[in-house]
Image (cartoon, coloured by chain):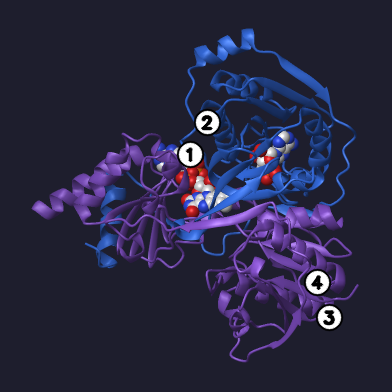
Amino acid sequence: MNQDILVVIEHLRGQVSDISYTMLAAGRELAQSTGGSVVAVLLGHNSQNLAGDLAADRVLYVDHPALADFTPEAYQKTLAGLIGENQPRAVLLGHTTIGMDVASGLSAQLGLPLVSSGRSFTADGKFISQICGGKIMAEGDLPGPTALVTMVPGGYKPEQGQSTQPPQLTEASAPALEGLRVALKQYIEPEVSDVDIAREQLLVAVGRGIQNQDNLSLAEELAEAMGGVVCASRPVVDQGWLPTSRLVGKSGKTVKPKVFLAMGISGAPEHVEAITGSDVIIAINTDPAAPIFNVAKYGTTADLFDLVPALTDQIRQAKSG
Amino acid sequence: MNIVVPVKLVPDLVEELTVDASGSALDTAWLRLIINEFDDHAIEQAILLKEQSGGQVVVVSPNAEGVEDMLFTASAKGADQLIKLNGDFEDGVNNHGLARALATLLRDLQPDLILTGVQAHNDLDGSLGPLLAQYLEMPYVGYVSGVTADSGKVVARKEYPGGLIAEMEVTLPAVLGIQAAEQPPRYVAISKVRQAMKTAAIDEQEAATLDPSGGPTVSRMYQPEATEQATMISGSEDEIAARIIDIFKESGVL
Ligand SMILES: Cc1cc2nc3c(=O)[nH]c(=O)nc-3n(C[C@H](O)[C@H](O)[C@H](O)COP(=O)(O)OP(=O)(O)OC[C@H]3O[C@@H](n4cnc5c(N)ncnc54)[C@H](O)[C@@H]3O)c2cc1C
Ligand SMILES: Nc1ncnc2c1ncn2[C@@H]1O[C@H](COP(=O)(O)O)[C@@H](O)[C@H]1O
């Protein structure tokens, strides 16, 4: 075993995901306490060019046609081999649709311990995980011999994991990737819609606190009165009350309006990661402990069903008067 | 198709969460448990698949307060078999331990498809689905929002950020981590749940001794200290509304 930190680079259709850079920054912090190097692991096909700006001591690159696009089984097989050969102190993967598909399987396959929802590391190498929708932090010693950690965004800035100096690249060979039971058939592009919430300046965002579809009219009337657009958290979209094009968050869009008015949204990490670029966040939530108040500039614990109609009324009056 | 849905109850986040005297675990005394919302979608997806192509749906859950209600609700929605797993599910039990216990039970059920919720908000050692898949030597795909059955295979629609979908063809038997069902989970009237309580039976099974190895040990648990805390606005509805309008004006959107 050595003291290196392997960082599994995530990329989708030719673009390195932000979480990869965040993990390189986390890996750097952890490597300082272990005394090892930061080794980026890049799996792909004709993807060497993606390594250019990775802030790593070196890049381990594996090229194979079966790795051209992410599939869980091919990734897991390849990573299992690399981890076995390198025996690092830790392996960082995204707590994402890519990393989470393989981290647990690797843990079970290799008999290595796994920590999920890791957000940062302390100077003495402890992990800090963020769980329960952002309401609880859990800290502990990094388990050994090799800890697998899935990382959430927020603990480091992606820019900290970028470098202008291309790192040294070593090629490693792929294992036999035949007889795979999972195959990518095709990508389906997101539906295009009339509005692009990523470009709007004023967003009225509704969460589960709105209770049902009929109540959405409260938000729509407010948005109309002010010339804004309604968007939503995941439960609202999963219920089919609004189309996916209005979803804000990890699985939806990242927004950066002048004003983001959040009503009945708790502020789960998967939602918050996509709104922090807003100039001003105003949160309406009856729970004073809701994590949304940790990112909002202004907040109120008023009941949205009382406050929103009052707000709409006043705006209408101001506009007509 | 024989579909098994393992379900877990998790703390309701709308309630206040507190850390117990040990300082390293949640205080469970006052915790209200609810179904993991992704499991609700997994049950829905299982029932949709059964409605489309036949088969049966088995719902399995470890014993916890409220588990019977949850199982009977699943039955009222269309689940055919309900299993409660008895064992020592004290805190500290992790997904590694549960996956090993469930793998033994699931092997006997010979499922074609296992649908789990893609994750739970209180996981600290990864999610259960891919652990189960590994122990059962099945393939796994997670973050799935829609499944179509197709002789010996399924096509799973896997979500990527921004609404991009990847259609993955998966050979059965397989485990899928469900993020959202094709349709919102159906609503069942309380009267139907009551009826299920009278007609459906819960099959109780004993879990083998749980082996938690593979998960981390937590030395400290705490509520995050806000680095930035919102300026709170209070007063009557009209006063709050007036202040918010001022903020809109200051921000140049009104
Ligand atoms: C892989 C993955 C991806 C995800 N992607 C996304 C994503 O892209 N976007 C996203 O939003 N979520 C996403 N989630 C889900 C996320 O974890 C949360 O479950 C979700 O954001 C919660 O939505 P919410 O805040 O609307 O609901 P809840 O967490 O249920 O919060 C509702 C809030 O409303 C408040 N409330 C209730 N009644 C009132 C009232 N009358 N007045 C005022 N306030 C009230 C409550 O206090 C509560 O805080 C994802 C999860 C996973 C696992
Ligand atoms: N103890 C358990 N018993 C049954 N199913 C579980 C258990 N733990 C997790 N699951 C399933 O796996 C899903 C993901 O939870 P987790 O693996 O804890 O992220 C849950 O929502 C359930 O579908």
Dot 2 amino acid type: Leu
**Who's blue, chain-wise?**
B
The residue marked by circle 2 belongs to what chain? B
What residue would you read off at disc 3?
A35
Q: Are marks 2 and 3 on the same chain?
A: no
What residue would you read off at disc 2?
B48
Dot 1 amino acid type: Glu
The residue closer to the viewer here, B70 or A110, is A110
Please state the quadrant of the image where ligand 2 appears: top right
Q: Which mark is residue A121?
A: none
In the shown orientation, is residue A122 left or right of residue B155? Answer: right
Kindly indicate whether the residue at mark 3 contacts the one at mark 4 (C-beta within 8 angstroms).
Answer: no
The residue marked by circle 3 belongs to what chain? A
Q: Are marks 4 and 3 on the same chain?
A: yes
Which quadrant: the N terminus of chain A?
bottom right
Local secondary structure at mark 4: loop
Dot 3 amino acid type: Gly
Q: Nearer the viewer, mark 1 or mark 4?
A: 1
Residue A287 position within the rendered picture, expressed as x and y whole percent measured from the top left:
49, 43
For label 1, being within 8 Å of ligand 1 is answered: no
Q: Which mark is residue B182?
A: 1
Kindly indicate whether the residue at mark 3 contacts the one at mark 1 (C-beta within 8 angstroms).
Answer: no
Kindly indicate whether the residue at mark 2 contacts the one at mark 1 (C-beta within 8 angstroms).
Answer: yes
Q: Nearer the viewer, mark 1 or mark 3?
A: 1
